[in-house]
Image: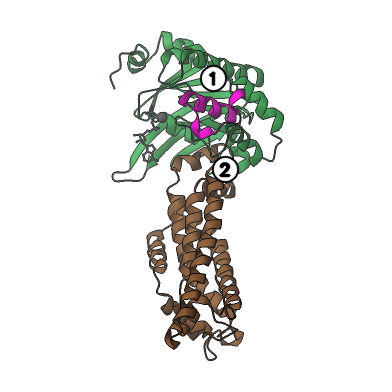
Chain colours: A brown, B green
Amino acid sequence: MLGPLPPIVWLTLYVSGVALALATLAGVPLGAALALNPFPGRRYVELVIYTGMGLPPVVVGLAVYLFLSRSGPLGGLGWLFTPPGMIVAQVIIALPVVIGLTSAAVGSVAPGLRLQVRALGAGPRQVMWAVLKEARLGVLAAIVAGFGSVISEVGAVMLVGGNIEGKTRVLTTAIVLETRKGNFELALALGAALLALALAANAVLLRLGQRARL
Amino acid sequence: MSAGYELRVVQQAYDGSPRRVVLDVDALTVPAGEILAVVGPSGAGKSTLLRLLNFLEPPSAGTVVFDGAVVPPNPPLSLVRRVTTVFQQPVMLTGSVWDNVAYGLRLRGLPTETAVSQVLERVGLAALARHSAAKLSGGEMQRTALARALVLAPDVLLLDEATANLDPYNVGLIESIVRDQNQTRGTTVVLVTHNVFQARRLATQAAFLLGGRLIEAGPVEPFFTSPRDPRTAAFVRGEMVY
Ligand SMILES: Nc1ncnc2c1ncn2[C@@H]1O[C@H](COP(=O)(O)OP(=O)(O)OP(=O)(O)O)[C@@H](O)[C@H]1O
Ligand SMILES: [Mg+2]
């Protein structure tokens, strides 16, 4: 019964892990920049991002599908029904979550702190780094939430990946398939694996957070 | 090294309706190597003046001349780093007392070991070096804030009520450190205080701000013994109601 599990778990971790890493690398600096630099129209950018935090994955999947399909603008990449295509979709899902929550965390750092570090001689990047350091627990929460948003989604990976056995099948799409086939035992085992994965990943992140709290 | 300021028709205003002019100074000279005490009631614009002197915000109008050169609207980091402020409410960074004092040196890529331990010794905090800065008492935080400013050996040291909330022993300690820094290094000091006695003890120059306007400024003795303006006289005698 364990037979099909390991490659599915591995692909799930790979797709969501790479998507989260990319969303974090881009989203944390963007979220900090959004909170730290007032510019005209910032309210509208925030509105778009907060809306993006609640994007239905299946809609993201549809849009990415159309872009990557053979007649779509990025059809030449050949990423439809492949892990890179699934990663693209999950980055789009996780990015607003990471940006929005990072921006909220950075925005709640006392404004006096920025003035303080500037008076001590911090340049713009050093200010951003200092503020991120003070907001680290909130930033960590942003990353955890970003992970949660991609590891559990099924709509986008189903549409863009196609749930191809041994190629693009991940835990959530496998659960859908096995449930439809009536293999409830296997579906439950896959569900347990998904929960265990989420638990392990969050435990690691929280562990980092505990160390950061000192 | 010493450096002084000259402010020419400097205004600071903040957005809002109506737009508020909180500082409006026609001319103020901060002579290099001296200690200027800025006194005035709450809301007079004292902290705002210090933010301008540390180049943390550009004035909405007028010119600030520092060390003989006009300060541009976006001053280079090398200029900002010649000045530092001990704020009215110092913000401690996450980490130990040591980390806080080393912070500015690290930003500049300078060695920390000896400089930090020396300055902690000087402000009487050597024993607390490894303690979390967030857990310090108010007075210890203020001394940490002074230490992390002094360690940078700035040309100008700006102190915003740096001895408020301190016991008499620590007030004396900080005053003697400031005096020593000024005399041995020629550091220009601008100190904001509500305390007229402290201003007289420490300063060589004094300035009186009221409602954002500079009412009177000059050498400390005539300023306190025979002020020209009746409002200054009322303030230094403690008669001003605000
Ligand atoms: N960033 C800002 N935006 C709007 N108003 C401000 C800002 N900073 C200061 N003010 C206003 O400017 C005025 C002067 O403030 P400032 O902090 O300089 O006074 P102060 O003389 O330092 O007072 P205190 O002795 O109470 O510290 C106050 O009325 C304050 O509300
Ligand atoms: Mg003030």
Which sits in the foreground, B230 or B18?
B18
Query: Label 1 is placed on what type of residue?
Result: Ile
Left or right position of B93 against A57? right
Asked if the magenta segment contains residue B74, the reply would be: no
- Looking at the rendered image, the quarter that the N terminus of chain B falls into is top right
**Residue A178: mark in rendering:** none
Q: Name the residue tied to disc 2.
A: B75
Residue A106, percent from left and from top? 47, 51
Please tell me in which quarter of the rendered image ligand 2 is found. Answer: top left
Query: Label 2 is placed on what type of residue?
Result: Pro
> What secondary structure is marked by label 2?
loop
- Looking at the rendered image, the quarter that the C terminus of chain B falls into is top left
Tell me which residue sits at (53%, 66%) in the image. A197
In the picture, residue B211 is in which quadrant?
Answer: top left
Residue range highlighted in magenta: B127-148
Q: Name the residue tied to disc 1.
A: B35
Decide whether the magenta segment is chiefly helix, strand or loop. Answer: helix
Left or right position of A124 against A40? right
Tell me which residue sits at (52%, 44%) in the image. A213
Chain letter of mark 1 equals B
Counting the numbered discs, the total is 2
For this orientation, the residue located farthest to the bottom is A71
Tell me which residue sits at (54%, 61%) in the image. A200
Q: Is residue A79 above or below residue B117?
A: below
